[in-house]
Image (cartoon, rainbow, N blue to C red):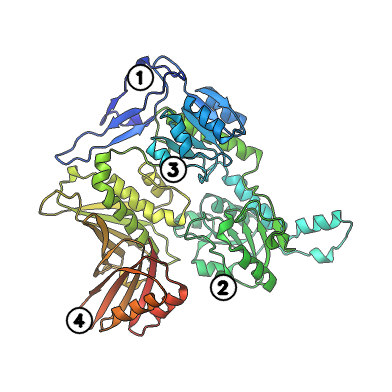
């Protein structure tokens, strides 16, 4: 059922006189179907959600431009619905010229869809489909600004990537690539290429999403013991296939083989580095079919040379293609392939069908779960909620960073304190932004109003909302937002409430988001830059001591606040910083005798 049909009982749909519109190049596409949510009180946040619809009442078809090779099954599906123009290897100028005649564009990774493409479309382009997962080549902010929905195809490559990971692991363990090259060079060195068995070995899967789960299934079939680390993996799903969820450090210390399946985010960038390699069992073997940037490649070479890492098998690299003289690529104990994870005939056809269905559905006015940018929201609503939207996302980011590595986030409680009546406050956008803040730091999923609830459900994240009605003027939409994560361990014990949940609270002051409570401690710090939280013994000179350490390291402090239980007892110091302190700087802060614990949080 389309989103329009599903909402028919509660919304009014204005069709913008589609009946007499044609879709020739001289007569541009109607802008959209505009869905207006009904008023529900004096201060209702009126919003309009753009549901693209490109089939005119007279039977005219929309035009879809396919800019890179797409599987035949996908093209056939598109042709049943629209006029399809398959034009490959276009220059940017040719794409900009052609795009003004098209209602949808489908690309892979080789075509850059920047602002100039949306400007050249003159408002006609309604959907961009990315045949694959990554959308680095699409300007999402420009797409949203021009009212263009962006969809991708994130699931069709799953089995192909998992199979390639298993293939690399087996080939690495038995020295297949090296032995093959040796025999073709006229050698016969059986003793040199003695391998290791997989059966009975421990495989640590880092990132237990779709691909990681499929790798685990196959590894279990090979007789391996499988453990996994992923803060969002549902324990019941892992246990169902015989996988134990463990902390990151335990995974590193226990594994004979490590298989990486995490997205590349600021949190995971170079997550395997000199420090983490030092925690691994000597002789570990590493497979990466995820993203090149999650491994510090120079550190991996050092780990290989020192014997910490016995072998590595890599399908992805920080820079692709890697340099011909790359020490990593040329290393005799490294097996490499040129980013072949998704390169099977079946996966290519699957991606083609998945993206074709998503594009056709979007052109029909359906809201796809694979949408990666936000729908249109009225300027009035955005203006009022803008600072609260920022606050909501940053509270989510803070809360998830306070969770200890081995804990999985499953239950989130959001409390809104407001003087407005329940019917006058629609919190969907705020809930979506909290979900975004919790999930995005360690995921490659783009969370927005369209897919927030779907993404949370898919990852086993249960969100509940509570509203506290306050006395006073309803002029401001909210007084405070509180985010609580239950059944988790915290890396900063003071962030736990009296009932044991990680708890952060914030409000908007003069248009600026502030953190106002951590656990049971009241603080007041602007949510700009990053934050250092310290639990300390309340005594004179602490602010000056910490400030001096940061100043000596050229770290600028933008805000500082201290909340305490009582004079000369425990206190929480919240410090806002514009720069990221070095590890040595943070170590010096932690070594101050009066500081009992501290944590650095990126916003």
Task: Determine crowd level at label 1: few under 14, some 14-19, many 20+ residues with C-alpha closer than 10 A.
Answer: some
- Mark 1 or 3, nearer chain start: 1
Return the residue at label 4: 567
- Seen at 61% across and 48% down, the residue is 161
Nearest-to-viewer mark from 4 and 3:
3
Return the residue at label 3: 140
Nearest-to-viewer mark from 4 and 2:
4
- 306 or 241: which is nearer to us? 306
Residue 18: assigned label: 1
Give the distance between the C-alpha atoms of the residues marked 2 and 3, in whole angstroms.
39 Å
- Mark 2 or 3, nearer chain start: 3
Relative image position of residue 464 (x, y in whole percent): 29, 52
- Seen at 65% across and 53% down, the residue is 315
Question: Relative to 105, is 470 on the left or the right?
Answer: left
Task: Determine crowd level at label 2: few under 14, some 14-19, many 20+ residues with C-alpha closer than 10 A.
Answer: some
Residue 279: assigned label: 2
Relative image position of residue 195 (x, y in whole percent): 75, 64
Q: Quadrant of the N terminus?
A: top left
Q: Give the quadrant of residue 34.
A: top left
Q: Can the viewer see residue 449? A: yes
Marks 2/3 in contact by CB < 8 Å: the verdict is no
Q: Can the viewer see residue 233? A: no
Secondary structure beneath label 4: loop
Q: Quadrant of the C terminus?
A: bottom left
- Mark 4 or 3, nearer chain start: 3
Secondary structure beneath label 3: helix
């Amino acid at each position: 059922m389309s989103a329009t049909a599903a909402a028919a009982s509660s919304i009014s749909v204005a069709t913008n006189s589609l009946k007499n519109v044609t879709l020739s190049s001289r007569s541009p596409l109607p802008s959209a179907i505009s869905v207006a949510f009904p008023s529900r009180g004096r201060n209702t946040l009126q919003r309009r959600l753009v549901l693209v619809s490109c089939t005119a009442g007279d039977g005219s078809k929309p035009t879809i431009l396919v800019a890179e090779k797409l599987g035949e099954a996908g093209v056939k599906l598109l042709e049943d619905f629209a006029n399809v123009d398959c034009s490959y290897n276009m220059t940017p100028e040719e794409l900009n010229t052609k795009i003004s005649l098209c209602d949808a564009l489908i690309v892979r990774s080789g075509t850059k869809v920047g602002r100039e493409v949306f400007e050249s479309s003159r408002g006609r382009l309604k959907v961009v489909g990315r045949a694959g997962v990554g959308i680095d080549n699409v300007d999402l902010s420009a797409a949203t600004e021009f009212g263009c929905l962006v969809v991708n195809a994130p699931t069709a490559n799953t089995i192909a990537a998992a199979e390639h990971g298993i293939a690399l692991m087996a080939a690495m363990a038995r020295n297949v690539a090296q032995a093959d090259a040796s025999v073709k060079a006229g050698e016969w060195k059986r003793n040199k290429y003695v391998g290791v068995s997989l059966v009975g070995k421990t495989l640590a899967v880092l990132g237990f999403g779709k691909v990681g789960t499929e790798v685990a299934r196959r590894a279990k079939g090979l007789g391996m013991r499988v453990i996994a680390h992923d803060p969002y993996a549902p324990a019941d799903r892992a246990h169902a296939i015989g996988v134990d969820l463990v902390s990151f450090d335990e995974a590193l210390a226990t594994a004979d083989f490590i298989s990486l399946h995490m997205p590349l985010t600021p949190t995971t960038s170079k997550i395997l580095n000199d420090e983490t390699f030092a925690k691994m069992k000597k002789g570990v073997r590493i497979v990466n079919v995820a993203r090149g940037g999650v491994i510090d490649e120079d550190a991996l070479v050092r780990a290989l040379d020192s014997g910490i890492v016995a072998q590595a098998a890599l399908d992805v690299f920080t820079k692709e293609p890697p340099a011909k003289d790359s020490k990593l690529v040329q290393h005799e104990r490294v097996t490499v392939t040129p980013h072949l994870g998704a390169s099977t005939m079946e996966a290519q056809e699957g991606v083609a069908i998945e993206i074709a269905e998503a594009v056709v559905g979007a052109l029909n006015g359906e809201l796809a779960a694979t949408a990666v940018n936000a729908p249109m929201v009225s300027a009035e609503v955005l203006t009022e909620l803008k600072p609260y939207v920022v606050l909501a996302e940053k509270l989510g980011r803070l809360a998830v960073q306070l969770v200890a590595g081995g804990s999985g986030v499953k239950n989130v409680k959001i409390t809104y304190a407001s003087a407005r009546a329940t019917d006058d406050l629609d919190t969907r956008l705020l809930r979506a932004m909290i979900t975004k803040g919790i999930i995005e730091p360690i995921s490659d999923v783009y969370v927005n109003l369209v897919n927030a609830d779907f993404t949370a459900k898919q990852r086993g994240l249960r969100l509940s909302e509570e509203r506290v009605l306050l006395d006073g003027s309803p002029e401001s939409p909210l007084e405070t937002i509180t985010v609580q994560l239950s059944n988790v361990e915290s890396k900063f014990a003071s962030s736990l409430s009296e009932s044991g949940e990680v708890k952060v609270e914030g409000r908007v002051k003069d248009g600026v988001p502030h953190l106002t409570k951590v656990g049971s401690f009241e603080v007041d710090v602007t949510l700009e830059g990053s934050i250092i939280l310290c639990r300390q013994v309340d005594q004179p000179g602490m602010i000056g001591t910490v400030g001096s350490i940061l100043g000596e390291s050229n770290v600028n402090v933008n805000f500082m606040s201290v909340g305490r239980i009582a004079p000369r007892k425990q206190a929480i110091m919240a410090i806002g910083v514009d720069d990221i302190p070095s590890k040595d700087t943070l170590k010096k802060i932690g070594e101050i005798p009066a500081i009992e614990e501290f944590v650095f949080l990126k916003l």
